[in-house]
Image (spheres, rainbow, N blue to C red):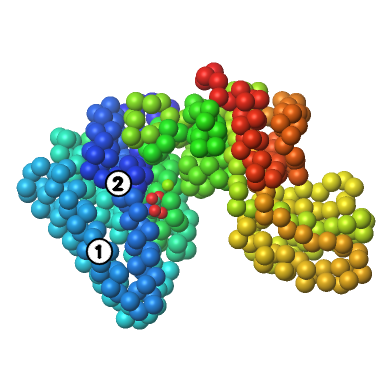
Amino acid sequence: MQREMTARLQVMKFGGTSVGDVPCMARTAQILAQGARAGACVAVVSAMSGVTNRLIEAAQRAGAGDKAQGTAVLESLRKQHTEVLQSLVREESARKAIEEEMLEVLAEGRRLFEGTALLRELTPRTLDAISSLGERLSAPLVAGAVRDLGLQSEAVDATEVIITDAFHGGAEPLMDRTREECEVRLRPMLEKGIVPVVTGFIGASTEGKLTTLGRGGSDFSATILGAALNADEVIIWTDVDGVLTADPRLVPEARTIPVISYREAAELAFFGAKVLHPKTLKPVMQAAIPVWIRNSFFPERPGTKITPEGRSIGGGVKALTAIQDVALISVGGPGIVGLPDVVGRTFSTTAEVRANVLLISQSSSQNDICFIVSAADAQRTVDALRREFAQDLAHEKVEHITVDTNIAIVAVVGENMRGTPGVAGKTFNALGRENVNLIAIAQGSSESNISFVVEEKAMKTALITTHREFGLGAAAS
Ligand code: ASP
Ligand code: MG
């Protein structure tokens, strides 16, 4: 194929903590320089850590008529970024050029805050423009640091290369247009040996209006560019060693998973192991481009490789996750047996109040339906259900609608659990031995996830027990 004939192309994304201060930026520049010496390399960078949050908070204040916080944030960003610039770029004239670029971005920020405060209105479009400032400040700095190491590098505004729909705050890429722009803007740079440093998180609509891809969207930027340029791999450099078998704060034996499938990684992203933006893998799935998660603080560590198939270890089980901020709602009583519309009405109601349903379980005796929603949605959902079933409650057709917030979901994830009998049995035996009471169980028909509900205070024991039972803490296979 074409790919083998041309030099290897890597897209490397650096998150906020990987560009968070001078030592981190310096390490990032080193990693990029090393990558660029070995082949072609495109960088995607986040804002320095915490910057996007500060900008969004100040934007909201400006929307209420107060521009002072915006002014203060911009001033502190100017200080913070010039300090980094002083340390990372040695040559005076190179520094001046970057400083001017940064001052222009800050001046634009000032106008945005002033306009918003004046109108007392923060539109989604303006919020996007304000939240993009952090990436537009960090990209020129990283490019400058890479040049300082003797390589060619240039900051590129993603509005020139990632073309999206006009949905501000969570735009979707238009891949064909993005591919065209990448060929025009990025490919020639790569051919000349220049390292493009692209702002993460940002795109532009077909009319050229700046959009953002949603919070944490720089991961998504990286895979969009990886797919558009048909890269050999995408590396997400972050501050953890990769995807872990469990949260190490709860399970001390947790370790990094060497290889995992797209599907398993997506399952883990959904179930609270927040290593990746949930849309990250979508762009690269079709072209089967591998995605790595690696630790920029310890670049010698191998990290986790996400591939189309992954590789099975520990009897098909790969990892465990847990979610705590959830509530179990139960609708039922013997009276609902054979009432055909209870299920339908229950979930029309959750849809009406836009509750995010994370798990559903109903036994075949049909005595009750229980499901889990985020704790934040619980009260709203229960109130709506009590209204919906008011008549049935009065006539005792439905006996109870209850809510329990002292619970947690533990999910066992692993694609090859499909066709591995005994995973559920093994799990529940082990939990039985430890006296962990199971409140509900759900397994999707994809069999890449078995979830169970336990009392919140039993969650840690459940995790440690299951982790041990499946040998997840053992050395890599
Ligand atoms: N800076 C953006 C955020 O904090 C995007 C990212 O870092 O992925 O959401
Ligand atoms: Mg992130």
Task: Tell me the amino acid under the disc marked 1.
Answer: Leu
Q: Decide: few, some or many residues near mark 2? Use Cα within 10 Å; few <14, some 14-19, many ≥20.
A: some
Q: Check mark 2 vs ligand 1: CB closer than 8 Å? yes or no.
A: no
Circles 1 and 2, Cβ within 8 Å, touching? The answer is no
Residue 188 placement, left or right of 255? left
Tell me the residue that label 1 is attached to.
74
- Cα distance, mark 1 to mark 2? 17 Å
Quarter location, residue 153:
top left
Q: Residue at x 30, y 59 (%)?
A: 133
Q: Is residue 413 visible?
A: no
Residue 470 placement, left or right of 303? right
Mark 1 vs 2, N-terminal side: 2
Q: Check mark 1 vs ligand 1: CB closer than 8 Å? yes or no.
A: no
**Above or below — where is 366 with respect to 104?**
above
Which of 94/53 is in front? 53
Q: Quadrant of the C terminus?
A: top right
Tell me the residue that label 2 is attached to.
20
Q: Position of residue 418 (x, y in %)?
A: 70, 30
